[in-house]
Image (tube, rainbow, N blue to C red):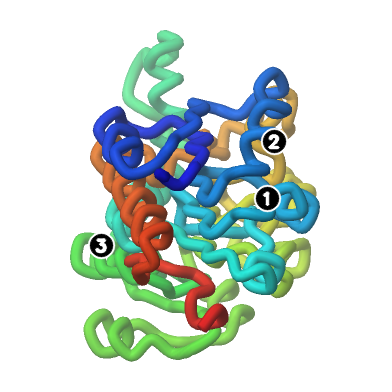
Amino acid sequence: MKPKVIVYSRVPDEVLTRIKKECDVTYYEKLTNDNYSDFMKELTEAEGVLGSGLKVDKQLLEKAKRLKVVSNITVGYDNLAIDELTARGVLATNTPTVLDDTVADTMMALILTTRRRVVELDQLVKNGEWKDSIAEEHFGLDVHHKKLGIIGMGRVGQTLAKRAYAGFDMEILYHNRSRNEWAEDTLQAKYCSLEELLEQSDVVCLLTPLTKETEGLMGNQQFELMKSSAVFINGSRGATVDEQALIHALEEGKIYAAGLDVYKEEPVPVDHPLLSMRNVVSLPHIGSATHETRHNMAQLAADNLLAALNGASPPTPINEKDLS
């Protein structure tokens, strides 16, 4: 008998077909209020679930007694109660590596659009306000030869640093839980305290995972340390930033601009103060959102799911070592 699995996010047809060859699949393109009760009924018999964003906590796991694997189609896994999963012998997996380049591209785009005021000036042209040569009040700031401070020098951080160093001659500062010898040797990156990074950087890019230690990492005290000409980029999770502190820093001119791909509440409310600021570039959490990358993420998630159900070691496990 084929193992029963639930795919609760939209995946490419060929990925879904592949999973169906080996599993009895219940498929939801998206979980909604209308189908959630059906999903919970199916969950009682499921041995695997695959998708993005489902909060897998103790309460949900109480309903999923047969569950063997949870396959996240994301790098981040703050939606998963890893301790609860491990205690119940449930394998958790994610999809790192395949999106590093794409997310780094998005972060570089935010750096360029904030410092050169691309979005704001695009709107100026479209509004018919370009009557003569552009006045100094619309000038932006250089990116090349400036200091990029990366908080969280993981795979994406390294990939972004490589682009900034090789393509824009930027000096790389970084703050991380541990030293990154590759970045120091190859990119002449400088390891420093968070305070030193904030004080010296022209661009501060936050790329940490969301943990108890990083929740609210950027607050009033941190924004006060930044240069008034510096921009802040968030590609981590919305909860790593005190949004009221960010709003205050932007309103008071404590920092020059912000580029955001994540928010504390998503989708971000249309009346959110950040959305009315001309010096904020707002993206709808699209760091990895290209056709190629999302396809590769779904393929890797399927690899993880099927390997785990077949008793093999998945390519990118989260808690496998703690289960052995």
Label 1: few (<14), some or many (≥20) within 10 Å?
some
**Which residue: 48% across, 75% down?**
320
Residue 177 horizontal side relative to residue 310, left or right: right
| Pointer 1 residue | 64
Residue 230 in view: no
Under mark 2, the amino acid is: Met
Q: Which mark is residue 40?
A: 2
Vertical relation: 8 (above or below) 83? above
Vertical relation: 255 (above or below) 268? below
Vertical relation: 164 (above or below) 234? below
Looking at the image, tell me whether mark 2 or mark 1 is earlier in sequence order: 2
Looking at the image, tell me whether mark 2 or mark 3 is earlier in sequence order: 2
Residue 220 horizontal side relative to residue 236, left or right: right
Under mark 3, the amino acid is: Arg
The image quarter containing residue 232 is bottom right
Residue 44, position as x, y percentages in the image: 67, 43
Under mark 1, the amino acid is: Ala
Q: Are marks 1 and 3 in contact (CB under 8 Å)?
A: no
> How far, Cα to Cα, is label 2 from label 1?
9 Å
Front one among 159 and 230: 159
Q: In the image, which is nearer the foreground, mark 2 or mark 3?
A: 2
Label 3: few (<14), some or many (≥20) within 10 Å?
some
Q: Residue 163 carries which label?
A: 3
Residue 104, position as x, y percentages in the image: 34, 55
> How far, Cα to Cα, is label 2 from label 3?
44 Å
Residue 32 horizontal side relative to residue 110, left or right: right
